[in-house]
Image (tube, rainbow, N blue to C red):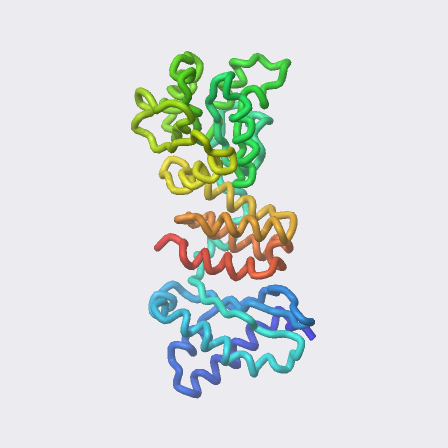
Amino acid sequence: MPIPEEKAKDIVSVAAQIARAQGLESEADVLEHCSASLIFSGEEFDVSGYTLTLEIPIQTYADIEQYRDHLEKSIRERIHPIVRRYPDSRIIEVIIIPELPAESQLTTKPLERPQASDDTPSFWKTGFFRLFISHTHANAISAHNLKTALAKYQIAAFVAHDDIEPTKEWQLEIERALRTADALAAIITPDFVESRWCDQEVGFAFGRGKLVVPLCKESTPHGFLGKYQGFKAKGLQAPDVADQLFEILLDHPLAAERMADALVDRMANSWSFQTSREAMTLLEKLPRLTQPQVAKLVQSITDNDQVARAISVPERIRALVTRLAPAR
């Protein structure tokens, strides 16, 4: 029979009493001061697996962090005989994480994002990082292929020839895309240097303090572009360019937080076990998380069944949160 989730508190209480009786002070402290929850992790050979998460006060966590891995293993072994009354279930992992502040735990509203003064243009996908791709007409196909490859990384790209409706005044739409974009990537070719429009697009992004990434296809960056981080895209296929561009957006201070927002949204709104696992793989590339992002990720385990029941995803989220949560 499965382990009732409400039994987590009782299981931990019994384990705490045994640890205290045996003089294992650190283990007893964790078990006595934790908020415990059971997360179903999947089923294998008719045995249901669970992750036991123990959220503890920050000071308690700081005291045990250096030997946290040892405690997790020890507590898992201690709990094993306690749950033998549920022969078809098993605690496969114990994760100890620091407690989030109460206001963060209750955060359910969407993460705040920069808003344009007018309505968000319909060509941006909700919850995606917004990238304007500046290119000349001769590179329209390359820009389109890059846009397609970037979708894998929760990046919505604006390509003028793809996204401007025939009935819209094209210059106005380009301006709206530039005003609401999070960053700009410029496909640098010899004709780019000669293009008055491309230079204006880049200048617009500079003026708004947005990241500009030169993709050097057949030429080198000129003017202010020469100072910015880019890479040689000549000879690379669109998926390879997308992968390198994603890595830059993840780490650059002008784009990292919005990129992380997009990946957290992807997990929170996951519609299948597979998309949850794919989102997790991308999230694990993040170098840092903000407190609201941490709160939203933890909340996704409770709110989204496709996250909670995806094999290994809940425990991977908790491990990520433990590693990247900002110090307080």
Q: Is 84 situated left or right of 281 in this image?
A: right
Please identify the quadrant where the C terminus is shown.
bottom left
Percent x, y of residue 211: 39, 31
Q: Residue at x 61, y 58 (%)?
A: 310
Q: In the image shown, does 224 or 35 lie closer to the viewer?
A: 224
Classify the position of the N terminus by image quarter: bottom right
Question: How many numbered discs, if any?
Answer: 0
86 relative to 205, above or below? below
80 or 24: which is nearer to us?
A: 80
Check the image and report above or below for 260 versus 98: above
Q: Residue reaching furthest front?
A: 235
Q: On the rendered structure, is 100 left or right of 3?
A: left
Residue at screen point 49% across, 49% down: 283
Nearer the observer, 109 or 232:
232
x and y percent of residue 42 in the render?
A: 63, 64
Above or below for 231 versus 313:
above
Position above or below: 193 against 9: above
The image shows residue 140 at horizontal and vertical percentages of: 53, 21
The answer to whether any part of residue 152 appears in the image is yes
Q: Position of residue 104 (x, y in %)?
A: 47, 52
Would residue 328 be seen by someone viewing this image from the given angle? no
Give the residue at x 62% y 51%. 274
Query: Residue 119 falls in which quadrant of the image?
Result: top right
